[in-house]
Image (tube, rainbow, N blue to C red):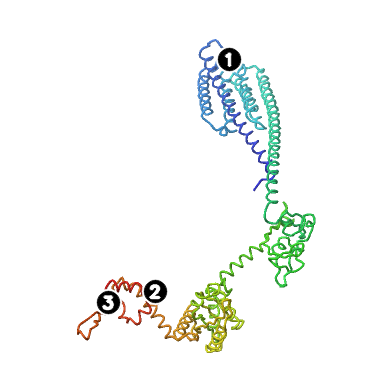
Amino acid sequence: MVPSAEQTEELILQEQLAERAQKSLAQRAAMLRVYNYYRIILSFLLMILFYEIGDQSFVGTYAPDYFQTIVLAYVILNVASGFYCLLVQDPARITTPVIVGITLSDLVFITALMITSGGVESGLDSLLIFAAAFGGVMIHGQISYLFPSTALILAFASATYTRMIGASDNLQHFFEVALIGVAAFAVNALLQYVANLLVKQEMEVVSLSTLEKMRQFAERSRRELEEQYDRFNVLLMSTSEGVLGLDTTGSIIFANPRACELLAINHDDLINQDLQDFMVENENQNDRGSSIIFDALGITPRASYHPERWKSYQGETFIVDISCEKTVNKSAENTGAVVIFKNVTEERHKEERLQYLANHDSLTDLPNRTHFLEILQSALSRAARTDRTTAILVVDLDHFTVINDQSGQQAGDEILKIMAGRLTDTVRPGDMVARLGGDQFAIMLVDLDSAESAALVAEKVIQGVSTPLNLPSGPESISTSVGIASTRKDKAAADELLAAGVSAVDSAKARGRNQYCFFEPEMQQKAEEKKRIQMLLRSAVDNNEFQLMYQPIVDIRLGRINSSEALIRWFPRESDPIRPDIFIPIAEESGQIGNIGAWVLETV
């Protein structure tokens, strides 16, 4: 999510403050290291004065033994704190407690060195002011007054202690102590004032820097918005879909050129039009179409509209595909909607045409085999719940191949279209005629009293088909064979019923054609046996299942064998022997007789 201007300003300010804090920490760490160098040099300088200059009267003169111990401890403390400041890489680890501890220890050690050197008279009291000033520089705010207060208390305690032990009886020392305290507080107040000025100046610098970054950000955002607007405008104007902006009442407040083109109206006339004026009312009053738009706007339509149909300004209707999104403001209040639509009339017609071609025969416009089986299966499912009968008629034109070869394919196609019309006229409106392929058709008869009622339709089909045809090549008569299969009490599958009808029409052709024949179980058994023999014939030659029997031909006059006749016999591995009068016609019909004939010639 893109941050708002206020959020961006806050982020920039936080970055500036973080940079300032990091810079302040680095500066404080550098000052502490410098101060540690100073303390180390100071402690070593006191040691040099104590050990090398014997006639001095202000360093360790009152209690040399104690001074020696204290100054050595002071050296060790300063070296240790110096190493700590050098080893610490992270400035954030030099915290306020660390600085307070170092400053207070400094004040204590300087006070102890001052006492062992004779008190205020030694002149080391000025070091207290310097140490307190360092603490005020490092730490801002009210806590900084801890250091001059501590320095004043320690200086007063030092003057009191030296007076009690008789090291000094001059009351002037207390006046000097007061001056030390005043100087320490004055220096600290001055440092705090300067520090506050610096902080205020830094905040002003941060504000100026923030404003500059905000200006740069605003300029960059303006350029990006302009670029985005240009890209959006190009996309909006060049898109192939219509885009409409609506207010909360459904009035059009924006339209791209494609929307004006689809609605056949110019832009100025389209603005402020009610979108409902371009919707087609639905005859079904219970169907509130285009609800996606009205739901987005939160309004009630004036009428019931078709969910997929709009009309142009001239009243021409078209099929439309719609998407709609409501628009809201920063307060999440509905301000209208954006509608994207396109004319999909041509695409929808293409889809319907493809769907039609997938289910229908392109020559006769009848349902094809696939569609016929789907409808037949539905009819069989309904018939299973009633006592009514469903039957199919498989219609096969007799000798159509001969007629097609003699008259030509164009004449054959014309005959098929005529026959499709005649078959359709023969049946009732609720029945169905389909083309299975080639010159074979199928008729579904539903809601019959009995299977015998299908015979009446079969007779009408035979009579209707036999009516002479007036072709450009001359009159032509054609007959047909019809196979009838009907549902029994048990539920049947569509493909099984169709297979039964095909078996029945084969039986009608075998009986002389131009007649109808009912399917009987014996036909199914023959069909299954025929299929089994066809399967076995595929591997008979490779498995050496055929044998030749040679029957001699005798010349009676000469009384000797003149020649021999080769007779083929078949002994399948997984079946009983099959007679030639059974398998040879099947082999001829299935086209396998060629392989068998070649084997016979080679074997003979």
At label 1, the amino acid type is Phe
At label 2, the amino acid type is Gly
Nearer to us in this view, 402 or 206: 402
- Residue 324 is at least partly visible in this image: no
Q: Residue at x 28, y 71 (%)?
A: 602
The C terminus is located in which quarter?
A: bottom left
Marks 1 and 2 close (CB-CB < 8 Å): no
Picture coordinates of residue 588, whole percent (x, y): 38, 77
At label 3, the amino acid type is Gln
Picture coordinates of residue 200, whole percent (x, y): 71, 31
Disc 2, SS: loop
The first of marks 1 and 2 along the sequence is 1
Left or right, 291 with respect to 385, comes to: right
Which marked residue is nearer to the observer: mark 1 or mark 2? 2
Residue matched to label 1: 58
Tell me how many marks there are: 3
The first of marks 1 and 3 along the sequence is 1
The first of marks 2 and 3 along the sequence is 3
Looking at the rendered structure, which numbered label has been put on residue 591?
2
Nearer to us in this view, 407 or 317: 407
Mark 2 Cα shell of 10 Å, populated few (<14), some (14-19), many (≥20): few
Residue matched to label 3: 547
Left or right, 204 with respect to 527, comes to: right
Left or right, 19 with respect to 504, comes to: right
Mark 1 Cα shell of 10 Å, populated few (<14), some (14-19), many (≥20): some
With respect to residue 108, does 474 lie above or below? below
Quadrant position of residue 187: top right
Mark 3 Cα shell of 10 Å, populated few (<14), some (14-19), many (≥20): some
Nearer to us in this view, 274 or 425: 425
Quadrant position of residue 300: bottom right
